[in-house]
Every structure is written in C-alpha cells, then in structure tokens.
Amino acid sequence: MTNFTRDSCGHIIKAFLLSPLNRKAFDSFFGICYQSTVGYLRYLKAKGFQLPHELKAEGNPFGDLAIDLLGTFLHSNRDRPFPVIFGYFNKLGYAQPREADPDDLLHCFTVLLRGHIRQQLARLKVQQAPQVDHLKRRFKEILKDVRFKILPKSSGEEWISLAQHCDDRREGRPPLLYNDLLQIVEKAYLNSRSRTDWCLDIFKLVNEATQYQNLVKKHELLTAIVSVNSKYVEADGLQPVCLPTPKEALLTKTIEEAIAETLSWLKESVLDRFIHNVRIDSEEAERFQQAAEKYLSDLAHTGQTDSLPEYFREVMPEGKRITYLSDYKYVFETTINQAVENFKDRLKKKSTVLKYRDYF
C-alpha cells in the first residue's frame, strides 16, 4: 500500500470530492482511508481499546478489520454516491470544494473517519459482548448523577470531574495521561464494592494526582473502565472473549424476554397496588419500574448490582432523594425485591435447557 504524505492526502481528498466516480481518484482516496483506519486501530489498541478481531493472530487482523469498517463508510446508494462522506462535507459547507484548502479537508476527513470507526467498533462490540455495552451504559447513567460534572470543551470532547472540584480544575497543569488513568481505574476497581463506588473512587484518585488536571476525557474513562473490567472478568472465566455461540445468544434473548415480562407483571401486581393505597403516585411508579429494569439488567448481564439506594438516586428527582429513608425505603425495596424473585422464577422456567449462572 502506498505511503501518503500529509500534503498529498489533502489534495487526494479534494480530487475525490470533485470526482468521486473517477476510478483513479477513488483508488487513491481508498488508499488514504485504509491507511488511516489501520493507523487509528493500532493507536486504539495501544491505548487499551479491545478490538473485535484482536484474537485472530494469523493473517492481517488490523487490515481485515479496517476493510470491515470501511464497508459502511464507503457504501453508495444507486442515486447518491458515498452518502456518509458527502453528507458530512456538505453539512460543513464544502458542497463545492474546488476552492477549499486541502489541509482543512484533511482535518474534516480525519474527524469524520475516526468518528465512524468508533461508532462501528461500538456496534461490533455490542454484537460480540452485550455486557460491554451494558457496562458503558451503566457508567454513563452513573455519571449523570449530580456528584459528577460534565464539562464540554471547544474541541467537542466531553471532560468529567467531581462536581465539588469543577471550579478548581488545575487547568494550568497537563491532562492525565491515559496509561496513568488506566492504573487509577484498576486501583479503584480493586478497592470498590460497587460500580458507583468504583466511579467515585476513580475521581477521588484523579484528584489526588495533583501533578495533573483533576478531570478526564469521558471516552478515555469509559475505555479504561471496559479494559479493566474485561481483564478481571475474563480472568474469572465469566465473559466470552469471542462471538457468542447460538446457546449464549439464546440465553441473552431469554433474559430480555424474562425482564420484559417481569416489568409488565410488576406494574400490574405491585406498583398499581401501591398507587391504589396512596403509597406512591403514577409518576413515581413509572420511575420505580425504570429502576427495576436497571437492577434486573445489571443482575442478569453482569451478576453485580449497586446498592438499592443508588438505583433510587438514578431515577428520582433530586428533591425526593433526601426523603428515601422516611418516605420511600419500604415501597422501593419491596418493589425491587419482588421484581427479582419474579424474574428468577420466570428465568428458571424458560431456561430448562440452558445452564444459567451460579448466582441464580
């Protein structure tokens, strides 16, 4: 594959945008796409990102994965060539790129391609390991808590700190390096008892690293969390490290069906009764049902749950959280506990052919 210089890349992208159906222009553009994708995959690998094909040592795993990812990037419709690429450049005002600066086009192309790669990797990882997607979703939920602060930056990236430190970010100091963040995430993991504790401990340790800023990039944090979780879960033999077998896929489907049925039962048999007895109102019942779904999903997909009050905090408005013990504890914990028992019963009936995890 030809090696491209930065200067030549901008001109090749421009030539492609002007004549996308020209074979020579496309071949050169494809070469840039391929080389850039392989390079970015190697970068992600070095940063600790788990790539879907990384277990295939034979052949050219980075190249094979790059081809897979570029299939969706370069696809064309009959009446609209390369809609992903031209949709993006048109949105940025490059519908007529003849006078555009090649360096600007290269910058935009790099942002587009890397964003597409991350999206497609996320899709592939969901297909391969649903629990990874579940873990990331759970941490995104945790990070919405008022104890954390999301700080958008001009680059478009999201940075996060503890809310109590957001006015003292130590911005005159360098940002935390990814390898140092990875070590902090692992240390916090080993000393925590729940995912909420894990997340809080990460930021406490980040704040103690006074030589750095006390905030982290959201995507680097999630990558480090997945990496550390996979390291220890796979070591215990609990997480598949390849595509799920038909039996594992059937188990996942069975779990989702059982959760949906339990939530329907919960509303009719438990929550409606609490509404009738004026223990909660209909809006609170809906929030309790959301909490039950989160709890059951955690239990089923990972075997780990946070404390019940943490799920209450996630779904309830801030003003009601402080009255948990006096106004909601009995109703909420009864709701969750009955949901768990119902879910277990349903799963056992559905899973007679399948061997489920030991914690059930």
Image (cartoon, rainbow, N blue to C red):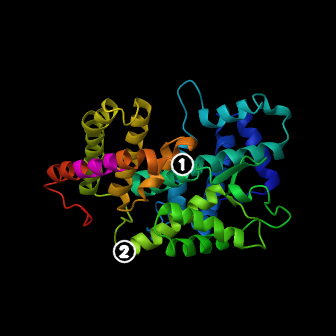
Q: Is residue 341 magenta?
A: yes
Please report whichever mark, 1 or 2, sits nearer to the chain's N-terminal start: 2
Disc 1 element? loop
In front of the other: 212 or 35: 212
User: Can you name the residue that lies furthest to the front here?
Assistant: 326
> Marks 1 and 2: which is nearer the front?
1
Disc 2 element? loop
- Tell me where residue 195 appears, x and y as whole percent: 49, 62
Neighbourhood count class around disc 2 (C-alpha, 10 Å): few under 14, some 14–19, many 20 upward: few
Image position of 205 with respect to 120: above or below: below
Magenta stretch: give its range: 333-342
- Tell me where residue 309 appears, x and y as whole percent: 45, 54
The amino acid pointed to by label 1 is Ile
- The circle on residue 236 is 2
Q: Residue sitting at 50 percent across and 49 percent down? A: 313
The amino acid pointed to by label 2 is Asp
- Tell me where residue 41 appears, x and y as whole percent: 59, 60
Image position of 89 with respect to 228: above or below: above
* Residue 133 seen: no
- Locate the C terminus and report the quarter of the image it occupies: bottom left
- Locate the N terminus and report the quarter of the image it occupies: bottom right
Q: Is residue 216 magenta?
A: no
- The circle on residue 322 is 1
